Amino acid sequence: MSTDTDVLVLGGAGVDTIVYVPELPLPYADSYMIEDGIRTRAGQTGDFVALGLSSLGLRTHHLDLLGDDPEGELVRALHREKGIALTAIPQPAGTKRAVNLVAPDGRRLSLYDTSRSHADDRLPEATVRALAESSRHVHVSITHPCAHALPALRETGVPLSTDLHDWDGETPYHEPFALAADIVFLSAARLTDPERTLRRIAERGRAQLVVATAGAEGAYLLTDGDLIRIPAVPPLAPVVDSNGAGDAFAAAFLFGHLGGEPPRRCALYGAVAGAHACTVPSTETAATGRDDLLERAAEVDH
């Protein structure tokens, strides 16, 4: 079957305001002077995955709810600038936004504005089905409207991936995503037993590949019942920001997967892209390109 799109990205569009703080947790004070400035730019998890995929040469389409507001225009402008197809469903509550406090060591604390979503928010099923059926793969963000799209997506038969981010392995909200996807990404940050969580996802759901990223400790890859440790890739520049590293990892992993590479190679691509993302300030939206990814992976693999 011919397809118009390699990867459809569902959800995760929004705007972040970046504040570089002297440390985290931030001690109470009446005020702080922010010498690096306070900057607002488009780019939440879906935007970063779409950007990473497109930068690697994959035909990418992004679908989400957006408001008719300045934040929504920032998201639209980012997609226009990067040449990423965008289908924006009107969101009367406004475009999703967050404030990210970023420490000197690259750690972040995100404050999400939940006033810009409603319990009855939905992505139109006909639109979801049409875009999914014209795609090779669908990557699903764990936002509320995407949860309601999961049954329709599964009925299309198109392979799915999702990123559970810092799931603790127990919170029920994440389970529908974990059990519906063929490829599951998550962070090991809150997992007391990463192997146990990865195996539970695979045993209870559809996932053939489960990956938990662990920052400087690399990643865990579960494939064909085997748990493989993937070493971290040393970044080529100073680490300044961890924001977007997981999204970069997922995009590069999917690039390898859709190119027919074995899982371990896909994870290496993810580690390379994740390391690069840590050298890019939160105020920027810059993903690694295909040639740089392949060159760096070849260096690391020798």
Image (tube, rainbow, N blue to C red):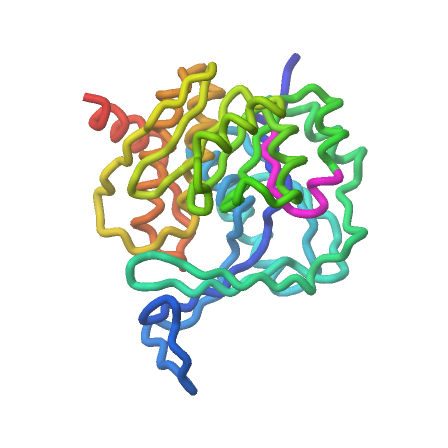
Image spot of residue 176 (x, y percent): 67, 35
**Residue 2 in view (yes/no):** yes
Residue at the location (30% across, 49% down)? 279
Location of residue 116 by image quarter: bottom right
Pick the residue in front: 289 or 122.
122
Question: Which residue is the extreme one toward the bottom?
Answer: 30
Image spot of residue 104 (x, y percent): 29, 63
Image quadrant in which the C terminus is located: top left
Q: Is residue 238 above or below residue 187?
A: below
Pick the residue in front: 196 or 57.
196
In this picture, residue 295 sits left or right of residue 260: left
In this picture, residue 124 sits left or right of residue 167: right
Residue at the location (39% across, 30% down)? 220
**Residue 57 in view (yes/no):** no
Location of residue 8 by image quarter: top right
Q: Tell me if residue 3 is in the magenta stretch.
A: no
Pick the residue in front: 227 or 291.
227
In this picture, residue 120 sits left or right of residue 164: right
Image spot of residue 87 (x, y percent): 68, 42
Residue at the location (65% across, 59% down)? 95
Q: Which residues are magenta?
A: 137-148
Image spot of residue 51 (x, y percent): 48, 41
Residue at the location (26% across, 27% down)? 295
Pick the residue in front: 276 or 146.
146
Q: Is residue 95 above or below residue 63?
A: below
